[in-house]
Image (spheres, rainbow, N blue to C red):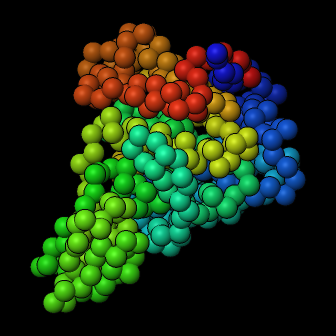
Amino acid sequence: MSSNVYFLSLRAKDENHSVMRRLKRLTKILLEDRIERGDLTAIKIHFGEPGNHAFIRPVFVRQAVEAVRELGGKPFLTDANTLYKGGRANAVDHLESAIYNGFGYSSVGAPIMIADGINGDYFKEIEVNLKNFKKVKIAGGVYDADFLLVLSHFKLHIEAGFGGAMKNVGMGAAPRSGKQMQHAQFKPDPRPELCTGCARCVNHCPQGALKIVNKKSALTPELCIGCGECAVVCPTSAIEISWNESTIGLQEKIVESAYGIIKTKEPKVAFINFITDVSPDCDCSGWHDTSIVPDIGILGSHDIVAIDQASVDLVNQSIGLKESALSKSFNPGEDKLRDIHPHIDWSVQLSYGEELGLGFREYTLKKI
């Protein structure tokens, strides 16, 4: 089987065929007959780390916001806090970063909500019973929404090979502890020299695996389930964030998380990928290296697997830019993703997503 993936070229011959107008039309095509009047509509987006400038342009986001409003929905922009301690690890810094990068109400026409709360501990658990996870965590603001519209900037990624809709949902809509579970086979190892005995880890541990002994945090290993809650709440880094998962394991966990999140929303979910400013690194970087291919266009689909497969194919079918991080794969048809990150099999998230029934790798492109 195959799924429809709508393609919007960045070419525009006149005002009536502008990218802005066609983007709004694409959004309406995806939402019509699915969104209902009054639906609280989470527009999941990556606001970009301060210093990066490759994120989706706010003027594009406004077209999606206006389409939601015109169809009767109530849109808000959202993302979940990051695991690493950059400019978006808590809601205050995250909101400031979003506004700094141009996502204020006056630009996008919608409020912003950080989906997992001030410190990243507002979430729901969804039972999935899959290979790596029995349960996955979803940021509360995404869980509470009636409709989920996912806007993803397609780019490469140092651990997953690429970041598209699957990563934007599976990792991006997970709370901080959910991200920790994806990044590691986690067991805390409290460092006594940094521990102040504040007991925040003890209070957040759902299994009672941590306790304060002699004014320091101590673990009972057999009780630990590896949820990562302690690492994300520790104020002194006495319990460190861990990043030891394999690239295959990480991709599988991203897909399983996306599976749980999407299953709570279907059929009220849609995806739009922006294949512009295709950088060799994630938008979580505090910089943007030059694009590896020319800007290609915008895709839309109800199939998360198909839209990411189409995005990969369009990048690999494109000519590679000489003055970029590419070393050899400049010709159309050559694998740009493996040129940049040769140790990563980027196809894992697509094949596993198809295996779990999230969609199909075969697709039909339909021009808007």
Note whether 265 is above or below 3 in the view shown: below
- Horizontally, residue 184 falls left or right of residue 267, namely left
Of 285 and 357, the residue lying toward us? 357
Task: Write the residue at 52% across / 47% down.
Answer: 128
In the current view of this chain or complex, which residue is farthest to the front?
Answer: 222
Note whether 329 is above or below 35 in the view shown: above
**Residue 227 is drawn in which quadrant?**
bottom left
Of 79 and 188, the residue lying toward us? 188
Q: How many marks?
A: 0
Of 319 and 281, the residue lying toward us? 281
State whether residue 129 appears in this view: yes
**Residue 203 is drawn in which quadrant?**
bottom left
Of 350 and 62, the residue lying toward us? 350
- Horizontally, residue 52 falls left or right of residue 368, namely left
Task: Write the residue at 63% across / 58% down.
Answer: 143
Task: Write the residue at 29% across / 87% down.
Answer: 198
Q: Please provide percent x and percent y for residue 29.
A: 79, 32
Task: Write the residue at 64% across / 17% down.
Answer: 2
Q: Please provide percent x and percent y for residue 147.
A: 72, 50
Q: Please provide percent x and percent y for residue 221.
A: 22, 66
* Quadrant where the N terminus is found in the figure: top right
- Horizontally, residue 232 falls left or right of residue 309, namely left
In the current view of this chain or complex, which residue is farthest to the bottom?
Answer: 214
* Quadrant where the C terminus is found in the figure: top right
- Horizontally, residue 284 falls left or right of residue 97, namely left
Q: Please provide percent x and percent y for residue 298.
A: 62, 29
